[in-house]
Amino acid sequence: MSELRPLEPHALCARCDPASLGFQTTEELPDTDEVFGQARAVDAVRFGIEMDAPGYHLFVLGDPGSNRHGIVRRLVQSHAASLPAPNDWCYVNNFDEPNQPRSLKLPPGRGVELRADMQQFVSELGTAISGGFESDEYRTRIEAIQEEFKQREDHALGELGDEASTQNIALLRTPQGFAFVPVKGDETVDPEAFASLPEDERKRIGALVEAFRERLHKLLHQFPRWRREMHARVRDLSRETMQLAVGHLIEELKQRYCDLPVVLGFLDDVLRDVVEVGDALREQASKGEPLNPEGGISPQRYQVNLLVGHTSNAIAPIVFEDHPTYPNLVGRVDHLAHMGTLVTNFTLVKAGALHRANGGYLLLDVIKVLTQPYAWEGLKRALKSGEIRVESLAEVLGWQASLPLEPEPIPLSVKVVLFGERMHYYLLRSHDPEFEELFKIAADFEAEVERSAENVHSYARMIAGLVHAQGLRPLRREAVARLVEHGARLAGDAGKLSTRTRDVADLLRESDHVAARAGRTEVLREDVEAALAARVRRADRLRDSVHDAVLRDTVLISTSGTHVGQINGLAVIDLGDFRFARPTRITATARLGEGDVIDIERKAELGGALHSKGVMILSAFLASRYSRDIPLSLSASLVFEQSYGPVEGDSASLAELCALLSALADAPILQSLAVTGSVNQHGKVQAIGAVNEKIEGFFDICAARGLTGEQGVIVPKSNVKHLMLRDDVVAAVERGLFRIHAVEAVDEAIELLTGLRARLVSERVTGRLEKLSAMRRDFAGRPRTRARGNGAANQAAVAAKPAKRDV
């Protein structure tokens, strides 16, 4: 059994030699922009951010803590520095359709200037209007128009009065209006005198008066038309005066923006609108009131809503939206309460992250986008259409009854970078048909890299960079070597290094704190060890409780003696930031039956699918090895004793199989050993996870009870390369107080556990199964006992019952 010797101490933990690092402290290492262990992902990110084509947006996959955000942001910043600043975007009033504001595209920096200039224009507008309409020229021309109308009216009335006087009829102006009366000389004829006139004379005078009345009536009907003509001339004069008063302000602005036709068109619209609404503006200006909504005309009418502005020397924007709600992505339209209702206008249109990132890069966490209502759909719609349309959710869903504000869409040119886990990427790729069309590039960040000499040196440079960036104390090379070993432990593989830089950065800060409390200027290996021990101490309350239950025999675990059909398995409890293992007793029983191996955990609905699969595999192994020519005539039961929660995984299938073989062969199992590993149908032992935690979990129980040199753990040989055990475990193995065996097949494990040759155990199992098969045949061949009583019903029941058949 020489091949079953325990592992040597050097195989239990791959140490990092500090001398191989080539420096004394991290101060000797230069700052570098090198990205540790992510060459493939970095190439994908660079390709994605440089590719200028529709749909080549980027999805960054990886585990949390791998510094994906920092690496991608640094790469994006490097590329953005070579790109020019994007254009400014403004919204201005659409004077023809106020509910459809117009967008203006301006060179970077010009939007800020235009907004300031239009604010100055609004502030000077009232003064310019007052000055124009209070001038002597304007008053003189108004008076001339009014005098001309008065003279025209008086002249027409005078001609009619003169003509009537030739007929001895006078035109009189009375409080009730105009009246024609007969005169004699300079005196009007009173009614008595008029009645004394001959009838023919009265008729002649009456006919004349009626004719003049008719002409006066027609003349009075012309007066309103003349007044309209006068008002039109006054209005034209007012428009002309308004244009002269405000025109010089517009012309000054046009000179500043002569190179921007879109601004010139906007200024022409402003001037035209000022002239159109001049009376309202003049009325407010004459009262000395500010132009406000209550006055009917708002100064916002001519202002510029700078949606996104840049400086002329800026670079492409990089926006990380931490709260990607629908409005925060595509923008929103705010409202103000006015006289009991909500009002809005173009100045209340607010930019979203897509506006701010337009012409640059937008960085988003995919899970945050997916959990916000309609944010994912809004993002996809903007990317597919190539434009940003500002709409409220109520408008999108058709819930808005009032007339909405519909700002003109803005063309979109942005590179979106989504951060998520692999599960998010593959779920979206499988279930969202538009996802593959929009996010063609995936940058998959490695969770671990090979622990080569080159990568170890790169890891050391990464540690030095983190120390420099955070302003921490320099690390001695021994401390760096300990961090390298910790990186391998995080990876769960002695030949790998974890890329979880966040965990390393946290450990650096904690180690620096330990060194500071000790009054040291450099971080030593013992500082790192102390920081790691403090981490465990903060998180191991549950582990202490579990171990206490074992040590006080509340949970029954034997670490000495032997027992048939009973074995120590190992289960892992993952708390997120802390993972530990505990031993668990697995028992097996075997009896005559029909070839069933009963998984009690499954029957109790506590066993998961993978655990049930492991039980079925060991059942297949039993049938394949021992029952090729005879029916498998046993009924076996497997159970995790004192297990009150779910059981998942197949890492206990080796222990379960060994317990079952022990029960069948009546071979006692050493309780000083614990077993972990899965098996296949051919009895080969396969690798499992968390091998370090499982070994240490059983070691802690044995150490608490006292190490005897007989205790140990059996692990798959394929897990040896993953071993990165604690120093106390390695030390115990060196002193011969604890042992770790690596096995490739179930036969090796059963020899270690029983102290018997595998062939002997196999012969016992075969003999037991043959005996059970014979017993089953005997039972099947016995004559049936006649049912008591002579009733016909009993005889019919016996005759109708089918006989059992061998399987």
Image (spheres, rainbow, N blue to C red):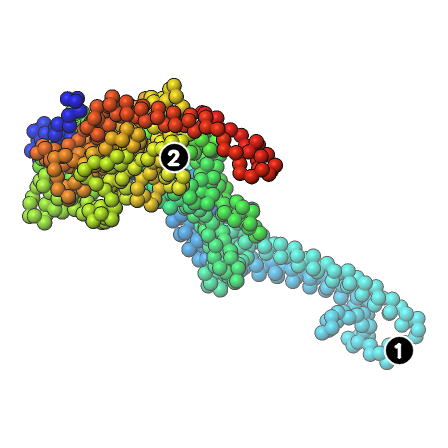
Which residue corresponds to the image point at 41% horizontal and 52% vertical from the top-left? 119
Please identify the quarter of the rendering in which residue 462 is found: top left
Q: Nearer the viewer, residue 349 or 396?
A: 396
Q: Residues within 10 Å of mark 1 (few under 14, many from 20)?
A: few
Mark 2 element type = strand
| Quarter of the picture holding the C terminus | top left
Residue type at tag 1 = Ala
Q: Position of residue 555 (x, y in %)?
A: 25, 46
Mark 1 element type = helix
Q: Nearer the viewer, residue 237 or 760?
A: 760
Left or right of 609? Residue 748 is left
- In the image, residue 97 above or below residue 134: above
Q: Work out whether residue 689 can be spotted.
A: no
Q: Position of residue 567 (x, y in %)?
A: 25, 36
Which residue corresponds to the image point at 24% horizontal and 30% vertical from the top-left? 667
Which residue corresponds to the image point at 26% horizontal and 36% vertical from the top-left? 566
Residue type at tag 2 = Ile
Left or right of 675? Residue 775 is right
Badge number at residue 195: 1
| Quarter of the picture holding the N terminus | top left
Q: Nearer the viewer, residue 774 or 577?
A: 774
Q: What is the C-alpha distance between the residues marked 2 and 1?
A: 140 Å
Q: Position of residue 344 (x, y in %)?
A: 50, 53
Residue found at the very far front of the displayed protein = 790
Residue, disc 2: 598
- In the image, residue 130 above or below residue 36: below
* Of marks 2 and 1, the one in the foreground: 2
Circle nearer the N terminus (2, 1): 1
